[in-house]
Amino acid sequence: MRLHHVQVACPPGGEDAARAFYAGALGLTEVDKPEALRARGGAWFRAHDARGDVVAELHVGVEDPFVAARKAHPAFVLADEDELDATADRVAALGCDVDHTERLTFDGYFRVHTRDPHGNRVELLAPR
């Protein structure tokens, strides 16, 4: 068994803010949703390794009424501490808070927490 994707939600019309965060700040690549699902709104994003294999996939779905995921969250592993810090800087430049208080609380990893523009919790990790 392996994980195929994680889904978070956004409010109606929130796709552009999700794109700015997940593609712009985190560096994921937006991919086309299947034709049969496009009318629902939302956006899909993927990360690829050096060989081009998909290593992470996140779907943003539209919910109305919308409620942000305050505890449940995706956690993305970045290459190293420098990439973690550069990504955190891009997230902060979007106006999203970045919490460094638990940076050294997960054995084997540096980590920070943030929230996407809709308030969904996101964790960023890098191996120590």
Image (spheres, rainbow, N blue to C red):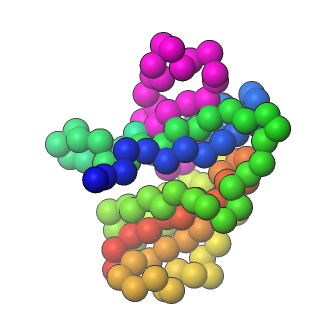
Between residue 2 and residue 93, name the one nearer to us.
2
67 with respect to 73 (left or right): right
Residue 77 or 92: which is nearer the viewer? 77
Near-viewer residue (66 or 45): 66
Number of numbered markers: 0
Residue placed at 61% from the left, 29% from the top? 42
Q: Is residue 24 magenta?
A: yes
Q: Quadrant of the C terminus?
A: bottom left
Q: Is residue 45 above or below residue 2?
A: above
Residue beneath the point at 56% across and 18% down: 38
Q: Quadrant of residue 43?
A: top right
Q: Is residue 49 visible?
A: yes
Residue 20 coordinates in the image, percent (x, y): 60, 39
Q: Is residue 125 above or below residue 11?
A: below
Point out residue 6 in the picture as x, y percentages from the top left corner.
49, 47
The answer, for residue 98, to whether it is visible in the render is no
Position of residue 80 relative to residue 27, above or below, is below
**Bounds of the magenta span?**
20-45
In the current view of this chain or complex, which residue is farthest to the front?
Answer: 1
Q: Is 27 included in the stretch rendered in magenta?
A: yes
Q: Residue at x 40, y 85 (%)?
A: 107
Snapshot quadrant of residue 7 = top right
Q: Residue at x 32, y 63 (%)?
A: 79
Q: Position of residue 61 (x, y in %)?
A: 62, 35
Residue 82 placement (x, y as % from top left): 40, 68
Judged left or right of residue 35, residue 64 is right
